[in-house]
Amino acid sequence: MSAIQEVVSEAPAVEAVPKRAMTLGNGTSLIMLALLIAAPLFVKNFIIFQLTMLLIYGLAVLALNILTGGSGQFSLGQSAFYAVGAYTSAILMEHVGMNYALTLPVAGVICFAFGFLFGQPALRLSGVYLALATFALATAMPQLLKLGYFEQWTGGVQGLVVTKPDAPFGLPMSQDMWLYYFTLAITIAIYIFSVNLLKSRSGRAFMAIRDNEIAASAMGIDVALYKTLAFGVSAGITGVAGGLGAIAVQFVAPDGYTSSSSCPTSRREFQKACPARCSACCCFWSSSWCPMAHGKSPWWPSNWSASSRRTSAISTEEKKCFLKNYVSPRSRRRSSLSLPRVAAHLPKRNTTPARPTPKSRSATSCPIVALPPPTA
Amino acid sequence: MELFVNQILAGISTGAIYACMALAVVMIYQAIDHLNFAQGEMAMFSTFISWQMMQWGVPYWGAFILTVAFSFLAGIAIERLLFKPLAKAPILTNVAGFIALYAIINSVAGLIWDFTIKQYPTPFGSSPFLGSQLISTHHAGMIGVTVLLLIAESARLVGVNTSWMIALGWGMAAAIGSIAGMLIAPVVFLEPNMMGGVLIYGFAAAVLGGLTSPLGAVVGGFLVGIFENLAGTYIPGVGNELKLPIALALIITVLVVKPAGLFGRPIVKRV
């Protein structure tokens, strides 16, 4: 086995699956949305509960989408952030008496901080080593939760019981139905947020880092900041999902968040469903608003492999291609959200719709390589 | 001082477990450059098969040999059926494959043999070894088997990565894993989740020793066992409760400070 790994492989670039093939159309998305809104009116409470859990897991997979599909960092440790979010929500509801809706932003912020801090040592790891470190985090989390030092807050091995909220304003719906609509509203909001995030400059920075980190940093993107931000945002969304999960299940316990639920599924619900299925159910409304707007979806291997083929030549055409993909917007939607401190060298977004060029589909076959370090 | 020496001895005896697991992990890493997250579950499954054979009346050593042979063939089969098609695929696909295998084997084992804890016999007996209270004969037997495996592995020809060499690597890793499982089961008791913590420690040991070196894996295993015991004894607050977070901290520290490990070869990435 050679001790030298070629980062740039010799295989030819492969055309990616076009974006349109993997998204639902506008009409289909609206029908799905209508179905989701209407569903609880016709089914029993337990099915509503299961639909709620489906939405919550979809939310967690959405977070993983931002992290792994967006910025290319593998994480098998989502269950750790989910657990932190769930416990934060439970502790705030039970010990501090906070309103359940207010615990969710707090859980999100705390998990964001936690994910941001974990992203710092993760900066130096990549590929299978990062997968290993996050796997170890997921496995170690139940023990941290059982720690005797925190037992008066976390309830130790037995965990905490959480009271389910009633529908407000005396609305004539059951607890389960209210929680379902509450979760649906939050899921839609976070979905819109993440779509906008991935289409903004920050999202393009993530995708540039995913595709070729060295070239991205040569273009002026602050790689360290964006990688840790990706971890933080993903952890924050997973934390919100965890908080919702705690309220829905009405119970938090350390052994409910083992590493076998970091796919993310739980033993009770989907019994180790394949991640692609979960991401499919979280992409209900994938129309032209598909988060992976550039035709790169994380769970399609053929697509993924397209972005890892590079040649070792470099030319001005390739530099232009890189700029076109990661600097100018390709979709016609204006993104309204952008994280602060974007790269200074990236030009400002223009507001006119991008002219479709004949080579616009060849984005992923564009041979992008590391640019040489600037001389002088 | 005596406490220190006792802890070292106890650390060596638990380290033998981690060394066995780490050896299997390194074996697969040498073949395919990926970490097999399902290694622990494969070992657990093999242990269950040997337990089932013993329930049916096969004597211990017969079951042992049959299980090792079965695991070797099963490892080759898994590689041919599941991971050969993924050979050219990117890392994420392979990692997803390993995690899927982890989940599937865990659940299938639970389905067939349920999640209650079972007793598993030890071939070496549990009497104190040479009069010492800390190492039983079983632990001494584990250390002996680990060293034997290391010698046997070093003698294997490490050739070019042709596809049958990869299958051979998988088969040997599965066989070593099954031996590790059968040695560990008397200590941690047989149930489908027994390998979770051991696997993390095995990874920590493999990373510490260097993922490209079997000797490093064994040395790393003993070092991790000693470190775990000393940390549990001397660092306040860390008792039995923080074993896995200690392993996590160790993995991250080693990967950040010296990713090649103690005996590994540094990988040079050509851009």
Image (cartoon, coloured by chain):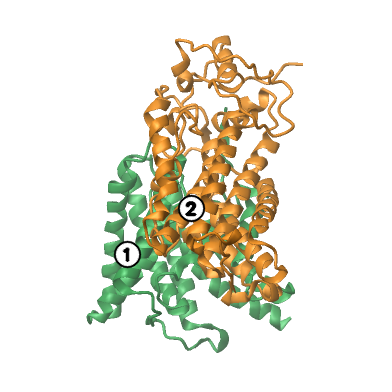
Closer to us: B66 or A334: A334
Q: Is residue A275 visible?
A: no
Q: Position of residue B32 (x, y in %)?
A: 42, 45
Q: Is residue B83 visible?
A: yes
Q: Which mark is residue B108?
A: 1
Q: Residues within 10 Å of mark 1 (few under 14, many from 20)?
A: few
Where residue A18 sits, quadrant-wise, is top left
Where residue A157 sits, quadrant-wise, is bottom right
Kind of residue indicated by mark 2: Tyr
Kind of residue indicated by mark 1: Val
Chain A, colour shown: orange
Closer to us: A246 or B150: A246
Q: Which mark is residue A57?
A: 2
Closer to us: A228 or A192: A192
* Residue visible at 47% across and 83% down in the picture: B137
Marks 1,2: beta carbons within 8 A: no
Where residue A321 sits, quadrant-wise, is top right
Q: Which chain is green?
A: B
